[in-house]
Structures are given as C-alpha cells and as structure tokens.
Amino acid sequence: MRGEAERLGPQRAAVSTAWASLRAVYMIWRRDLLRFWRDRARVLGSLVQPLLFLILLGTGLSSALRAAGGSTFAGGLDYQHFIYPGIIGMSVLFSSIFSGMSIIWDRDFGFLKEVLVAPIDRSAVAIGKTLGGASQATIGGLILLILSPFFGVHLGALDALELVGLIFCIAFALTAVGVAVASRMQSMMGFQFVLNFLVQPAFFLSGALFPLQGLPAWMTPLTRIDPLSYGVDPIRRVVLSASGLPSPLIDRLSLTLLGQPVPILLDVGIMLAFGAVLLAIAVVNFRHQQ
Amino acid sequence: MDETVVETRGLIKTYGRVEAVRGIDLAVHRGEVFGFLGPNGAGKSTTISILCTLLSPTAGQALVAGYDVTRQPGAVRARIGLVFQDPSLDDQLTARENLEFHAFLYNVPRAERRRRIDGVLEMVELTERAGSLVRTFSGGMKRRLEIARGIVHYPEVLFLDEPTIGLDPQTRNRIWEYLHALRRREEITIFMTTHYMDEAEQCDRIAIIDHGQIIAQGTPEELKAGVGGDVVTVTTRNPALAADEIRRAFELEPAVDGSNLRLEVADGASFVPRLVRDLTVPVSAVTLSRPTLDHVFLKLTGKAIRDEEVDQKDAMRMMHQRWARRR
Ligand SMILES: Nc1ncnc2c1ncn2[C@@H]1O[C@H](COP(=O)(O)OP(=O)(O)OP(=O)(O)O)[C@@H](O)[C@H]1O
Ligand SMILES: [Mg+2]
C-alpha cells in the first residue's frame, strides 16, 4: 500500500492540466445527466408547461381567430403551428434556468465545495455545467420535436437534424446565462428575482407568442435586445419553411434587424457569441470564488 | 524522521473587522495525527480552508506537502484529501458514484480506480450499500462515506474538519478506528479539528487554538504535564469564602467556576485530607483527578472549552442542516 501511494504521487502530477480539465468537464457533464436520468419525473413535469401552452393556448387562440375572422392566423398558418417553435424556445429557456438553479443547490448542499477543492481548473466547472444543462435542455426540445405531428407540424429528417443542432446552440447560450448568474449567487431567493424580472420578460419579448414586426416603438428595441429572440427566430424559420410556407410570408413573421430579415446564420452567430461571453463571465467568477 | 508536511508562518485571516485567525505558526510532521483543538469560532475551519486553498490568507504563509497554498494551489489540491465540517456529498448519486466522481476528478488511474474504491468502501463498511443512493444513508454512514472519499485518491495529507460532529459515541469510536487503521496502512498525515477533548487525547500532537491564536502546542502528555500534578475540585455553596480560606491556608490560587473551585497540587492524595481538615466552609464534594486537556484549556483560557451552550449550538446546526437538506 505504502509503495503504491508513493508511485502514484508523481504519476498523477505528470498528467497535463488541459487533459485533466477535459476529464473534469466530462465528469461534471456526466453527473448532470445521471441526475437528470434519475429524476425522470421532473423531466416529464417540465414538459407540462410547454404542452399547456401548445395544446390549450394554441388550440384556443387558433379557434378564436377562425371564429372571429373566419380565417387562420396568417396565410393558411394556424396559431398553434406558429407558436410551436416559440414553445420549443420556452422549454429550452426554462430548462436552462433550471441548470443555474442546480448550481445554487450544489452550493447549498455543499457539493460545490467538493468540486472547487479538486485539482482541476475551475473553468471545467463552468463549462461542464453549461454543457450538462445544454444537453438536458436539448433532450427536452427533442421530445417536443418528436411530438410535432400532434401540432400539425411535419418535419423531414434533415429539418429535424438541423433543429436539434439549433436547439443545442440556443440551449448552450441560455444555460451559460443561468450558470453565469448562479456563479455569483448565494441563495435561491436571488434566483427567484432573476426568474421573475429577467426570464419571464425574456420569454414574452422573444416572439414566441406573436410576431416581432409592427410592434409599438417602445417594445421593438426590447425584443431586439432579448437574446431569446435570436433563438426562437431560426427555429421558426426552419419549421415554417419545412411546412412549405412561402418565404415572403416567413420573412413577415420573423425577426428583423434594421428592417432586414435576419438570416439563420446571423441568429446563431449572435446566440453563440452571447453564450461565449456569459460562459467567460462564469469561468472568471468560478476562478475567483473562495 | 521529522519531515514537516504542513507548515504555517504568521498566518492571518480577517473577514472585514472580524479577525478569525491572528498569526498562527504550526508545524505538522509526516505521518502524525495532528489535532487542532478549540472552541466554536476559534478559527479552526478558517485555518483548514486556507491550508486547503479554499481561502487566501490576509497575511502570512502556509506550505502543504512542500507547496505554497497561495502560489501553487493546484499542486496542493492534488496532494490533499478534505472532509468538510458540513456535508458535501451528492445525495442523488449512489455511494459508489460519489467515489467514482471524486477518483476521476483526482486522476486516479483507471486500472486502480475500481480496486481503490472497493478498498475504501470496505474500510468504512459500506460495501453492501455501495449501490444505494446517498439520500437513503444515515448521518453516520454519510460521514463514513465522506472519509472514504477523502482518501480514495492517496492524499499525502488528510484534513478532517470535525469529522465526528453530531455523531453518537459508537459511531465516533468507529471513525477513530478507521483513522488509526488508515494511518497504519498508508503513509498519510492526518490534520483534524475537534472540540471533543477525548478525541484530542487520541492525537499524536495537538495545538490548542482560541480567538484565532495558538495558545499551546505539544503532545497531550506534554500539555497535561504543564498543568502540574493533580487537579482537585472543591464543590461548595460559598465559593468566594472557600477561595479565601484556601489562599490563606495553602498559598494556592484556586480557579473559581460557578460553585466549583479548582486547584493544582503536586500530590493530590496527601493534599485532600489537609484541605478537608482546614476548611471551615461546608463542602459538598471534593474530587481528585489527573489533569485532562479540559484542565489544560481551562488553565490557559480561564474557561471551559465545551459547555452545554456549545452543545446546543451544534445541535441547532445539525438540525438546520437536516432541514436545509429536505427543501
Ligand atoms: N465568511 C465569513 N465571514 C465573516 N466572518 C466569518 C466567516 N467565516 C468565519 N467567520 C468568523 O471567523 C471566526 C472563526 O470561524 P471558524 O469557522 O474558523 O471557527 P471554527 O473554529 O471552525 O468554529 P466551529 O467550532 O464553530 O466550527 C468566527 O468568529 C466566525 O464568525
Ligand atoms: Mg469549524
């Protein structure tokens, strides 16, 4: 036993820090997914809210619009179909926020200390948590994609693949927000504040429930600084074009910047840049944490 | 071989206006069990946090396993194991998963991992429950698992912050058995804090800390020898008067603690009869004892290290933790 301990010491020190950090990212990510899998009931529970919006609000408003104007929401498009991409965005948003909360729980339960005292670069904590949360959010989005036929949305395999990629990018950026906020926060109470004053407005301003064109002058800028707008927009473009809607109509229902429709790549670029900045903030915060 | 593995020089930590640690000098030798003894709020956890790189000192220097805790925190972290005062397990994972997570983060080679984890589980007698969620464990089982986790990666120094707090005497004894077994099996240095006197007695050397300062350091025997001879405790309804009489008759300075008077005498057995003969104040009890660390602490600080109030504080803390956990 004694000889072994001596042999292991130097060997351990020789492992490069980059490799050790990668391993730590993997382990932290893995733990998140393990807990996610253990807590399947909660996962299903987290789908209730999006489904309520889709089924009740979607069906209700679709019928109301037909009854009022005798027509669909826009050019043959049902309201339910219109909000479907927005609700995916919502599910990703709330699930990302949950990852932020899980960090505060870890702090409360002391587990965070165990990670912070380990011989790893603290950036691994921020990155591992962000990837873990993003993976969970993506799984939630995936379930909604699988349910798409029930909401009159029919997607090809390639569209679905593109959507999964998009959802992961958005989930990554939004989880980075949650992790960055939680990296500085000591209590759940503070998080409640964030939830009410940042997350809810972000949802309503994102274009999830209504198009972001022709809004009052005070509202338009708010929707444009809402990062979620750049998440809902590309999902909607892919879903609507997969449903065969003409592109002028899609452009009319989508996000514009300075009067120009925003291409999907720009949406994704903005989203990823935003996520990268917040992840960097989270890394700095964890590095300086005592 | 008296190689130093933990060393501090003039260690200071202030939180705003609170001076938690006020100039601590320590030297812990390789392979010993070093006890850090002090009452609540003395600065024990603060010192451990600094040694484990979780806090940076306001001033002073600390070396652990030969590395500076502020300049080479990574090297220190790779060489230490730590059992926190407050629980730090993931209770949604199983015991084995907690250990795997830890072993992986600490780079225990793949081939070793399994064997090592099985070994520590066996040592703390949790082999049978390895696959159960930690949520279903009792407090003592969780504590044992945390100790197992602290050593799974072959640390050179194991820091234990009140490893037995809130546990029943039986579990406390078991934990001590593990620690002694551990020390026999592996070349490991154990640095532990406690405010149980009987635990401090089991350490090779101890340092007594109060108000952020070390007030005594040495083996338990050395410290007790410092008290001098035997301790005689006199219980009386009129301590002030009794103290007066003792001062006059024996030229001794008794320490008054409620209705108790404590005296240090060279030969207790021959002193007690003389005392009983000469005192006019009614005495309800006289006890003669060998000095304990309690007496050492009393002598150095003039107060008992652990009284009912402190016990209650710990009980409250445990209750609060349990409650926090349930949320
Ligand atoms: N984060 C903090 N901010 C301000 N003061 C602190 C902080 N942590 C500890 N202190 C103060 O520093 C002093 C030493 O605390 P510490 O936790 O080191 O004591 P301890 O010896 O471990 O006590 P216990 O036996 O209760 O665990 C106390 O007065 C405490 O109030
Ligand atoms: Mg403490």
Image: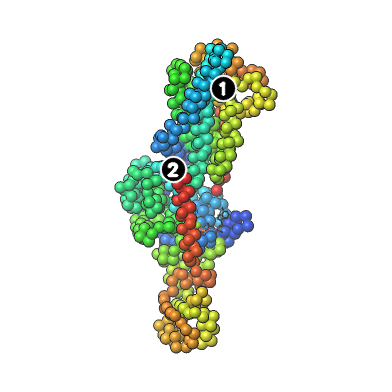
Q: Amino acid at mark 2?
A: Leu
Q: Which mark is residue B78?
A: none
Q: Percent x, y for residue A62? A: 53, 18
User: Badge 1, how many Cα within 10 Å: few under 14, some, many 20+?
Assistant: many
Residue B175 placement (x, y as % from top left): 37, 57
Quarter of the view holding residue A27? top left
Q: Nearer the viewer, mark 2 or mark 1?
A: 1
The residue wearing badge 1 is A233
Looking at the image, residue B152 lies above or below residue B169:
above
Q: CA distance from mark 2 to mark 1?
A: 39 Å
Whole-percent x, y for residue B43 in the image: 53, 59
Tell me if mark 2 has few (under 14), some (14-19) or many (20+) residues whose alpha carbon lies within 10 angstroms of its own.
many
* Residue A164 shows in this picture: no
Chain at numbered mark 2: B
Report the image quarter containing ligand 1.
Answer: bottom right
Given residues A3 and B95, the one toward you in this image is B95
The answer to which image quadrant residue B60 occupies is bottom right
For residue B105, the mark is 2
